[in-house]
Image: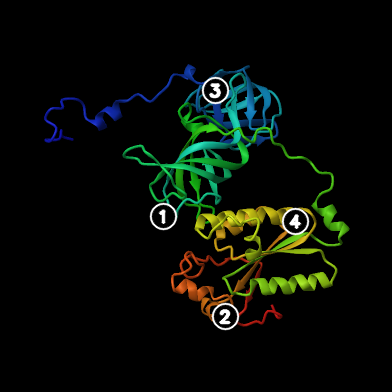
Amino acid sequence: MAASEHMPWYRGETLLGFLESIDTSRSDGERPFRLPVQWVNRPNQNFRGFSGSVASGAIRVGDEVVVLPSGKRTRLAGVLNPQGEAETASEGEAVTLTLADEVDASRGDVIAIASHPPEVADQFAAHLLWMSESALLPGRSYWLKMGSRTVGVQVTEIKHRVDVNSQEHLAAKRIGLNEVAYCNLMLDQPIPFEKYANNRELGGFILIDRQSNATIGCGTIDFALRRASNIHWHQLEIDSKARAAIKGQQASCLWFTGLSGSGKSTIANLVDRRLHSMGYHTYILDGDNVRHGLNKDLGFTDEDRVENIRRVGQVAKLMVDAGLIVLVSFISPFRSERRMARELFGEDEFLEVFVDTPLELCEQRDPKGLYQRAREGKIPNFTGISSPYEAPEQAEIHLPTAELKPEQS
């Protein structure tokens, strides 16, 4: 490493040398005790320990601890390290802790000092670095991995994009490769965490693509969003099965997906008419109809398509909870959003129906003249022409309509 000939006036240390000389360690007493559980150690019925590396602080046998996110309290009964039994555990040490009571804890939980526990929340603000060539889309479901805990996550809002050169805040609706953004995140369950500035282990995370399992982003938590802290689930006495039983049917969602002009709505209407004639209680959610009301504010960008399916999935779930058989007829072009919809339902409540019609045949039909206008450039973001359609890989029902008439399907 040599000094630049363009900076003869500078006599100080190089930037790399300075960074390598920074002491990043902290003393044990600076931060409260935290141990993310990596493994529940139970070699026999008489021993149960919780193994992991101490992320911060120190603890002594007899101290009161809390297991998060459950909030169960107990006392530290023992510490085991590679040298054997010990009285204390300190930051950086790999240890196994035993607790005084039979407290349920699992991989990904955090054992913390009871007097200063970390926060637990399912929504927070964070800085994200996006590492995928496919853009980050608000509303799309990803995996968030923090330490040994993995949970589902959605980016609910991109507050702004950060110019890494000027630190200027720029408006953005999507985030591309190597871009940094400030976002609001919503998890599918609460997790214990801390601000990244206070604890890197409990404040840093990565994002994982649900389809490829590739790491597509990383981020740092700033603070919890408390807007929903006073909202709780209201337990209903009459559940979905009871509502379906009084109708003499099994509540379910049939999700029809395919290109525009593939015959989704035609087939869904035929199924609806047949079920109705047999005395079943049904309802159709059709893509065009819903855009006249509930989704009137949405366009056809990738971001709006994601939000379109998110809303419809939630409505379909409510209808299944009401005991209905709901038929959803939407192009729903992205596998991620169809998977997100599927995960809202029980195993026996959701059937994906792939109305498989070749693009050429859809263009020949073109009952609304949409393909012709899309080819002429008059309709942007049109699925199959200027926007992709991701065909299902494992649909429960596959209908090759080039070979079958709608009535046969």
Can you identify the residue that label 1 sits on?
Answer: 133
Assign a secondary structure to mark 2: helix
Looking at the rendered image, the disc whose residue lies closer to the viewer, 2 or 4, is 2
First along the sequence among labels 1 and 4: 1
Residue at left offset 54%, top offset 61%: 334
Q: Earlier in the sequence, mark 2 or mark 1?
A: 1
Depicted 348 relative to depicted 145: above or below: below
Structural distance between the alpha carbons of marks 2 and 4 = 32 Å
Q: Residues within 10 Å of mark 4 (few under 14, many from 20)?
A: some
Q: Going 69% across and 36% down the picture, which residue do you hit?
A: 231
Q: Is residue 186 left or right of residue 3?
A: right
Label 2 packing within 10 angstroms: few (<14), some (14-19), many (20+): some
Three-letter amino acid code of the residue under disc 1: Glu
Question: Residue 33 — which label?
Answer: 3
Q: Give the residue drawn at x 19%, y 25%.
A: 12
Query: Marks 1/4: CA distance?
Result: 37 Å
The residue mark sitting in front, 3 or 4, is 4
Q: Are marks 1 and 4 in contact (CB under 8 Å)?
A: no
Label 4 is placed on what type of residue?
A: Met
Q: Disc 2 marks which residue?
A: 365
> Can residue 294 be seen?
yes
Amino acid type of disc 2?
Arg
The front one of 340 and 32 is: 340
Disc on the earlier residue, 3 or 1: 3
Residue 319: numbered disc: 4
Foreground label between 2 and 1? 2
Quadrant placement of the C terminus:
bottom right
Measure the C-alpha gap from mark 2 to mark 3: 66 Å
